[in-house]
Image (cartoon, rainbow, N blue to C red):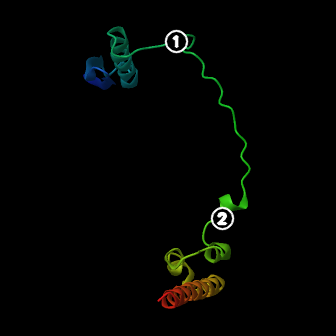
Amino acid sequence: MKTGTIKYSREIKNIAGNVWLGIENEYDMNSEDPKAVFKKAEEAVNEFAIQSGLILQFNNDSIPQATPIAEIQVEKKSEDIRIGVIVQDIMSCNDLIVLDSYKLMVMQPGKDILKGAYEERRRQIIEMETKDIFDRTNKLTKNK
C-alpha cells in the first residue's frame, strides 16, 4: 500500500485575532481519491472552527431582512451633464482674477469662440476698471 498525505490549513480572522487551523490526513493512494480526502479535511477544519466558536453561523430565518430602499427620481438638467467652459461662464466674470482662471482653457487650439469671448470680456473689465480709477481720481482732485 502506497500512502500519501493531505494537508489543509485555514486562517480564521475574528475579533479575538487571527487563528490558524490545520489538519494532516494520510490516505491510500491506490484506493482513495485525493480530492475526496482533501474535501474531508476541509470539512473537518470548518466543522471544528464552528464548534469551537471561531466562526459564527446563522440560519437565514434569524437574520432580519433589509427593508427596500426607496428610489428617488432625479431629472438631469443640461447643466448637470455639461463639462467644460461655455461662453456664458466667461462673460459672467466680474473681475480679472476669476477671468484669468479660464486663460489656459481658452487658449488651446480649436477654442476660437471661447478665446474671442475671453478677450472681449477682458477688454470690458479693463475698460470698466480704468473708468472707475479715472472717476475716483477726478473726485479726489476736485475735492482738493
**80 on left or right of 54:** right
Q: Residue at x 63, y 23 (%)?
A: 67
Task: Establish if 129 lies above or below 62.
Answer: below
Q: Secondary structure at mark 1?
A: loop
Q: Residue at x 61, y 66 (%)?
A: 83
Q: Looking at numbered disc 1 in the image, what kind of residue is underneath it?
A: Asn
Give residue 59's mark.
1
Give residue 82's mark.
2
Q: Residue at x 27, y 20 (%)?
A: 16
Q: Nearer the viewer, residue 72 or 124?
A: 124
Q: Secondary structure at mark 2?
A: loop
Give residue 1's mark.
none
Crowd rating for badge 2 (residues with CA inside 10 Å; few <14, some 14–19, many 20+): few
Where, by quadrant of the figure, is residue 108 drawn?
bottom right
Q: Looking at numbered disc 2 in the image, what kind of residue is underneath it?
A: Arg
Q: Residue at x 58, y 83 (%)?
A: 125
**112 on left or right of 62:** right
Query: Residue 41 appears at what percent x and percent y?
Result: 34, 18
Where, by quadrant of the figure, is residue 42 drawn?
top left
Query: Residue 133 appears at what percent x and percent y?
Result: 52, 86
Task: Establish if 115 lies above or below 41.
Answer: below
Query: Residue 26 appears at what percent x and percent y?
Result: 26, 18
Task: Establish if 90 lies above or below 39.
Answer: below
Q: Nearer the viewer, residue 7 or 136?
A: 136
**116 on left or right of 126:** right
> Mark 2 near mark 1, Cβ–Cβ under 8 Å?
no
Crowd rating for badge 1 (residues with CA inside 10 Å; few <14, some 14–19, many 20+): few
Q: Nearer the viewer, residue 24 or 3?
A: 24
**8 on left or right of 116:** left
